[in-house]
Image: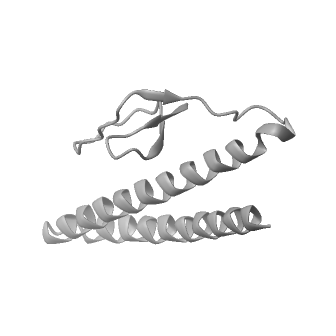
């Protein structure tokens, strides 16, 4: 996976596959960070890469949680209560994971201030 600038100039990860119907548009001004290095001189850009990835993944996960919640509602309307309940439980797990990612993002940003 590598980072690219999307149509809004945001740095986002690229190189993942999607098998769902909504659009993901990415510009291809590739920016390769130093995700595999341990050099002190590039720690700032590595940390910026982590912040960009966490921001992107949080937003992306929240979008998918919304889609799954809608799917659960649709299944409930079709009388598939057990499937709907199971998906809603999965969405709750998604949201717990997102809270942890949000906390990690906050901790990384606080570290940048030091």
Which image quarter: residue 72? bottom left
Residue nearer the viewer, 81 or 24: 24
- Residue sitting farthest toward the left: 78
The residue sitting at 37% across, 40% down in the picture is 6
Q: Quadrant of residue 104?
A: bottom right
Percent across and percent down for residue 113 are: 73, 67
Name the colouring of the figure: one colour
Report whether 97 appears left or right of 61.
right
At 35% from the left and 59% from the top, the residue drawn is 63
Towards the viewer: 59 or 109: 109
Q: Position of residue 77 (x, y in %)?
A: 14, 71
Query: Residue at (31%, 65%) from the top-left corner?
Result: 66
Q: At x 17% / y 69%, what residue is drawn?
A: 79
> Which quadrant does the N terminus fall into?
top right
Which quadrant: the C terminus?
Answer: bottom right
Q: Is residue 75 above or below residue 8?
A: below
Q: Position of residue 103 (x, y in %)?
A: 64, 70
Q: Nearer the viewer, residue 20 or 82?
A: 20
Q: What number of labels is visible?
A: 0
Residue 82 in picture, x, y percent from top left: 32, 69
Quadrant of residue 111 within the rendered picture: bottom right
């Amino acid at each position: 996976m590598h980072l690219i600038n999307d149509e809004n100039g945001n740095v986002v990860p690229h190189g993942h596959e999607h098998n769902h119907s909504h659009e993901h548009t990415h510009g291809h001004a590739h920016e390769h960070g130093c995700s595999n290095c341990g050099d002190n001189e590039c720690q700032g850009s590595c940390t910026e890469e982590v912040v960009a990835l966490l921001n992107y993944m949080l937003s992306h996960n929240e979008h998918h949680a919304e889609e799954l919640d809608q799917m659960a509602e649709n299944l409930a309307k079709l009388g598939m209560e057990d499937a709907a309940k199971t998906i809603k439980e999965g969405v709750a797990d998604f949201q717990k994971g997102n809270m942890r990612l949000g906390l990690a993002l906050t901790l990384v940003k606080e570290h940048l201030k030091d």
